[in-house]
Image (spheres, grey):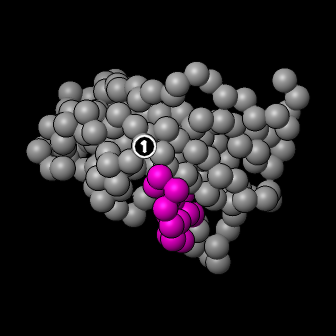
Amino acid sequence: IPADVPRSTTAPRWIASAPLLRGRAAANGIVFELAADEDVKVWRNRVRPVLTVRCAAKTTEVFVMTHSAASVVGNTSLHTVQVAFDGGDAPAQMWEHSVDHDALFAPDGSALVRQIAGARRMTFAFTPFNASPAVASFSVAGFEAQRQSAAKACGGKR
């Protein structure tokens, strides 16, 4: 497959696992991961972003593994992204990057989990460092069933 042709897989699906803490699975908590429907172009590479919902220590986090640093916005750790559900509006939001700069974290994981659970498709737009904007699409349908497990792992919060 040429590098500029998007690769896709058959029906993407959520994968659940226990979060790792210091190299071992945590006793409490859960991680749900969903690969994007297709690869996106970042600087000199093509990557498959991964949407992750993680609950550990009774805190819900949602982040997208972009496998690339995002473009710099001023002198902060925040980056502009746009998130839309089922073809709706995609208002600009500011998400913080991970320590290794390979992921972007939603400011309110619990609120985003509720949106994901009620949707069939989510689009995530960001600008990789030194590259044109990229848009990843995720087939999030079916997360409502997973949300029950996440709520239990996070101490009953939904």
Magenta highlight on residue 73: no
3 lies left or right of 148: right
Percent x, y of residue 53: 37, 42
Quadrant of the snapshot with the N terminus: top right
The residue at the far bottom in this view is 74
Percent x, y of residue 91: 51, 71
The residue at the far right in this view is 2
Mark 1 closeness class: few <14, some 14–19, many ≥20 residues within 10 Å: some
Q: Residue at 64% across / 77% down in the picture? A: 74
124 lies left or right of 5: left
Taking depth in this image into account, of 150 and 105 the one nearest to the observer is 150
Percent x, y of residue 70: 66, 58
Regarding residue 148, the answer to whether it shows in the image is yes
| Residue at the disc numbered 1 | 120
Q: Quadrant of residue 130?
A: bottom right
Q: Quadrant of residue 142?
A: top left
Magenta highlight on residue 92: yes
Taking depth in this image into account, of 119 and 26 the one nearest to the observer is 119
Q: Residue at 51% across / 28% down in the picture? A: 12
Taking depth in this image into account, of 100 and 1 the one nearest to the observer is 1
Q: Residue at 66% across / 36% down in the picture? A: 38
150 lies left or right of 22: left
**Total marks placed:** 1
Q: Magenta residues?
A: 81-100
138 lies left or right of 152: right
Regarding residue 94, the answer to whether it shows in the image is no
Taking depth in this image into account, of 18 and 140 the one nearest to the observer is 140
Identify the element where label 1 is drawn: loop
Q: Is residue 78 above or below residue 121?
A: below
Q: What's the residue type where badge 1 is placed?
A: Arg
Q: Residue at 58% across / 22% down in the picture? A: 10
